[in-house]
Amino acid sequence: MRFRQPLSDWAGALPALTASVGVSLSLLVATAWAADIGQPSSEATQVAPSSPTSLFAPAWAGLYLGVNGGVGWGAAGLTDNAGAFTSGNVAQAGALAGGTIGFNWQVDTLVLGLEADLDWAGVRGSTTGGFCATINCTTNLQWYGTVRPRVGFAWNNWMPYVTGGAAAGSLSNTIVGGWTAGIGLETKITPNWSANIEYLYSDLGKSNFAGPPLSVAVTERFSLLRAGIRYKFNWSGRICPIWPFC
């Protein structure tokens, strides 16, 4: 047996059902909106891809201070200014040690620098040949310094370079000057500390020394091999993309 509900009863219940569905939909929308506010979007949670690290990071630019030490060897030529006698070349050798200051600019892999150093020196020689047979001629380089541009090529933690510039020294208590040129290799130990080794050839020209007993001209030429350690200060200067348009 079936019981059929009168249509008038459904008509009376329809407003209440409609109101109930509306309230339910409102609650669902409010809940979804609240959940969306509390949960960051997928775009917000995406991490920006990190830029690839350049193989040639600008790690060499800035001011640096250091110490150095090495050995020097060469020959000094002694000639009587009267032109009558010569002693030939006087072999000389000894140690050097001192300090270094410099500054580097970097343009991609090109490193341009200016460096100065001042060393105590003990590069000595003596001879008894020629007119020195009776007076025992000696040479003594007491200090040595240079001011030199450097041009290097940065490859990760290594930088080979060429260098050349002005050189000066004290030869037997007389200031002499000339030029120097050479090559070197520098490597990073940490981002701020580096070590280098370099070879320099120096020509300090001809100097006159008055006797007694003779007036002598001395030509000073020698080679130098030394190593050093440097500390580079952090520098926030802009690296020029195209030199010299900085």
Image (cartoon, grey):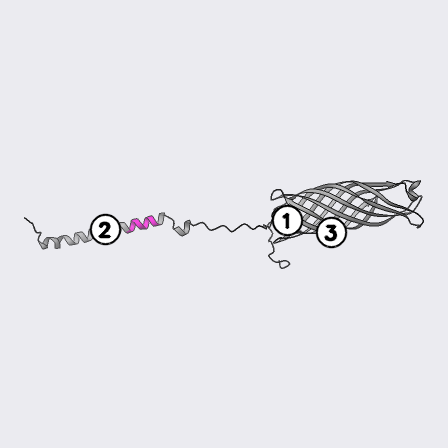
Mark 2 in CB contact with mark 3 (< 8 angstroms): no
Q: Amino acid at mark 2?
A: Val
List the residue tagged with mark 3. 164
* Helix, strand or loop for disc 2: helix
Lower sequence index among marks 2 and 3 = 2
List the residue tagged with mark 1. 62
- Find the distance from the CA under tag 2 to the CA under tag 1: 70 Å
Structural crowding at the residue carrying mark 3, measured as other residues with C-alpha within 10 Å and reported as few (<14), some (14–19) or many (≥20): many
- The residue positioned 15% from the left and 54% from the top of the image is 14
Where is residue 228 shown, x and y percent of the image?
69, 42
Residue 70 appears anywhere in the view: yes
Residue 172 appears anywhere in the view: no
Where is residue 216 shown, x and y percent of the image?
90, 47
Nearer the camera: disc 2 or disc 1: 1
- Image quarter where the C terminus lies is bottom right
In magenta stretch: residue 14: no
Q: Which residues are magenta?
A: 29-36
Q: Is residue 49 left or right of residue 203?
A: left
Quadrant in the picture for residue 134: top right
* Helix, strand or loop for disc 1: strand
Q: Is residue 74 left or right of residue 23?
A: right
Main SS of residues in magenta = helix
Q: Is residue 8 left or right of residue 185?
A: left
List the residue tagged with mark 2. 23
The one nearer the camera, 35 or 76, is 76
* Helix, strand or loop for disc 3: strand
Q: Amino acid at mark 1?
A: Gly
Mark 3 in CB contact with mark 1 (< 8 angstroms): no
Q: Residue furthest bottom?
A: 245
